[in-house]
Image (cartoon, rainbow, N blue to C red):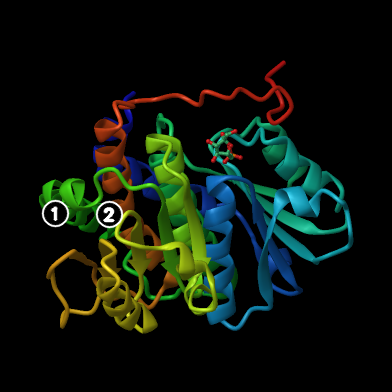
Amino acid sequence: MSYRSTVSRQPEALADSLAAAQAELAGLDLAPLGTGLVAVTGVGASSAAAVVVAAELQRRGRRAFAVRSGEMMAGHDLADIVLALSHRGRSVETVEALRKLPRAKSLAITNDSESPLAEAASFHVRLANGGDATPSSTGYTATLLVAGLAVDGIQGASGADWAGLPAQAAALLAGAAEKMPRLAQLFADRRAIDCVGAGASIGTADGASLLIREAARIPASGYETRHYLHGPMESMDETTGVVLFGDTREIELAHNLEEIGVPVLLVTSRQDIGDAGKRTVIHVPEAENLILRGILDIFAAQLLAAELSDAADLTDVQFRYKQTDTKILAA
Ligand SMILES: O=P(O)(O)OC[C@H]1O[C@](O)(CO)[C@@H](O)[C@@H]1O
């Protein structure tokens, strides 16, 4: 399946994931995950998702942090509970991280109930998102959705309108698509693109930078907003671009970047700012639940990555550098 068609199929994929995960979670007693320090882990796009999920757990008053599976592989006794995210359930780092912490109670979220990660975990919930492409779109948003449902199962309902998400996804994708011709022009021939956000949006910024790297092979990086002000922004100028996610300091940062001639895409729920000069704004609804907001925010970045991929003649590109030691192969 092509990247673009997979991005477009998200309203249906999210509806499928929602129905399947709600049914599966209804049969699980997640009480053993209710106390203790939580590590949320993953690698690649699943690591970006882990940052979003940990931020929502923190918002709900839970002691939780995100840690890359590659770092967790050292096997230090970091946490009592592990939420392990992996679309295919076969990433060596995430499986190894879980196996090295046998005393921790764990929940794996993957698309394969028979995957090594599912088998290593105390609990498992399947994504049921259907196919995915490179870079990950339905896999990423389904991981966040199912993690959001699981967090509600562990911490108690958050009031997030999960049932309304498929329709919201359709509306946001349609709205963002209208901005793409403008963005394709403003973001043409960038030598680098930074993606910036705070809190949960650090994960979204990281996920967005991966999309741009993988789909368009443009150097892109994710940064935390306040950290960005302390030096990383120095390499930006009129030959680069910045994607901002947020409603607070990101607005002022958009103005700062405009002053130095950098094209900006701002994804925000703030209605008091719109397109002007080299600034393009994509509005998203407000969402208290940070995982829901993380899903709403990423659609714009998915479409921007598709535009940049087309412009670079890389439509539906596959990874060009193959690794032999990152996935556990099926027997
Ligand atoms: O979510 P998973 O299946 O653990 O994969 C993690 C990452 O590894 C890759 O499959 C590349 O090896 C990426 O596409 C993905 O983001």
Disc count in the image?
Answer: 2
| Front-lying residue, 267 or 254 | 254
Mark nearer the N terminus (1 vs 2):
1
Q: Is residue 226 above or below residue 7?
A: below
Q: Residue at x 73, y 74 (%)?
A: 35
Q: Mark 1 to mark 2: distance in Å?
A: 9 Å
Near mark 1 (Cα within 10 A), the count class, few <14, some 14-19 or many ≥20, is some
Q: Is residue 60 above or below residue 315?
A: below
Residue at which label 2 appears: 300
The yes-or-no answer for disc 1 within 8 Å of ligand 1 is no
Disc 1 and disc 2 in contact, CB within 8 angstroms: yes
Q: Quadrant of the C terminus?
A: top right
| Front-lying residue, 231 or 137 | 231
Describe residue 297's horizontal placement relative to residue 169 as left or right: right
Residue at which label 1 appears: 179
Describe residue 121's horizontal placement relative to residue 26 as left or right: right
Give the amino acid at mark 1.
Lys
Near mark 2 (Cα within 10 A), the count class, few <14, some 14-19 or many ≥20, is many
